[in-house]
Image: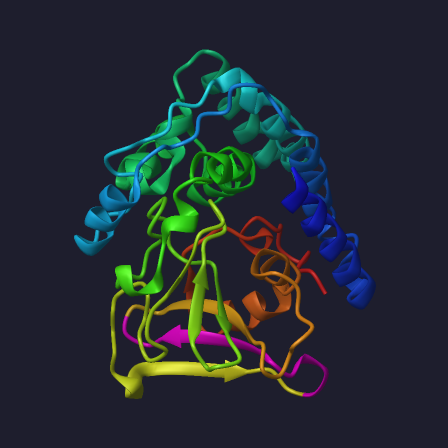
């Protein structure tokens, strides 16, 4: 898919700028390669019209809630197999968890839609626990394994979206929490979904996770020197955080997904201060002592 070729080029450029991360972030290269080669026939595409989409968004309901996708599990194998292989190599515990995931998947005990946070909610966590798979690992598999089919599924409705139609912290398409924030040239704050590629906007002084709007309990940690333009936005009420980039300063930054993947050191800073992340990252899977960078 053309957008994945662009992501791959951005990733190569980012690793050139951050050579110290090349080995520790190798898995993302495997992910992008699988995405670029994935092109099964008959990918489901959601066909809602503009009026129906607007009705749902005005009601604060993501489109996936009443229109869940029905993915063919066999078509997802080329996306999942190389990622599972890499994850199994992280350690014995991860290998055992991946084996349990693969067994449940092959036996049909784990459906693709049951992995989606916008549909499963707490059920996904309980299902992972029943299988002996950590929430972090299951979430990582979901995000890197289902993005291409979800991009295709929402491909017709995403162009129908307008920022004035949505005032919720979660994605208007798949209902996942945001993974990255962009401050645009006009100072507007845009949130990006790492699961389906959705993009929307909410106020700058607002936590997307708990809706806290008290400036006294909203913290911004700005990077300095060679990292100028990168930032961490955190909430001291729910303790959630999101990374971001100010494109007025870092005008040549890559797309949100690539910048998120390529800034694990910012996750280390945020986690070190006691904040949590709503979306998966390699930092959450890294064995002790193997922190990137």
Q: Residue at x 58, y 56 (%)?
A: 257
Could one spot residue 197 in this view of the protein?
yes
- Count of marks placed on residues: 0
Q: Residue at x 23, y 35 (%)?
A: 66
**Front-lying residue, 139 or 61:** 61
278 sits left or right of 222 in the view: left
Task: Say which quadrant the C terminus sits in.
Answer: bottom right
232 sits left or right of 228 in the view: left
Residue 188 shown in magenta: no
In the image, residue 4 lies at what x, y percent? 66, 44
**Residues rendered magenta in the picture:** 225-237
In the image, residue 149 lies at what x, y percent? 51, 33
86 sits left or right of 256 in the view: right
Could one spot residue 89 in this view of the protein?
no
What color scheme is it?
A: rainbow
- In the displayed structure, would residue 150 be above or below residue 231? above
In the image, residue 11 lies at what x, y percent? 73, 55
- In the displayed structure, would residue 229 be above or below residue 55? below
């Amino acid at each position: 898919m053309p957008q994945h070729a662009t992501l791959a080029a951005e990733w190569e450029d980012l690793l050139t700028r951050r050579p110290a991360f090349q080995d520790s972030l190798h898995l993302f290269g495997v992910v992008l390669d699988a995405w670029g080669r994935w092109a099964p026939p008959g990918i489901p595409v959601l066909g809602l019209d503009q009026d129906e989409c607007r009705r749902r968004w005005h009601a604060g309901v993501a489109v996936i809630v009443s229109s869940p996708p029905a993915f063919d599990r066999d078509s997802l194998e080329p996306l999942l197999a190389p990622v599972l292989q890499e994850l199994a190599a992280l350690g014995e515990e991860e290998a055992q968890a991946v084996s349990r995931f693969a067994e449940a998947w092959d036996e049909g005990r784990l459906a693709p839609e049951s992995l989606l946070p916008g549909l499963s909610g707490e059920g996904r966590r309980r299902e992972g626990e029943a299988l002996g798979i950590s929430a972090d690992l299951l979430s990582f598999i979901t995000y890197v394994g289902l993005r291409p089919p979800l991009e295709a599924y929402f491909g017709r409705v995403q162009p129908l979206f307008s920022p004035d139609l949505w005032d919720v912290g979660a994605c208007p398409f798949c209902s996942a929490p945001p993974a990255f924030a962009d401050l645009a040239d006009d100072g507007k704050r845009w949130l990006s979904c790492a699961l389906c590629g959705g993009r929307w906007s909410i106020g700058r002084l607002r936590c997307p996770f708990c809706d806290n709007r008290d400036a006294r309990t909203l913290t911004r940690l700005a990077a300095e020197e060679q990292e100028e333009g990168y930032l961490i936005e955190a909430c001291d009420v729910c303790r959630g955080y999101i990374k971001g980039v100010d494109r007025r300063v870092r005008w040549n930054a890559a797309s949100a997904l690539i910048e998120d993947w390529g800034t694990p050191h910012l996750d280390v800073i945020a986690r070190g201060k006691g904040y949590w992340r709503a979306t998966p990252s390699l930092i959450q899977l890294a064995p002790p002592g193997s922190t990137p960078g």
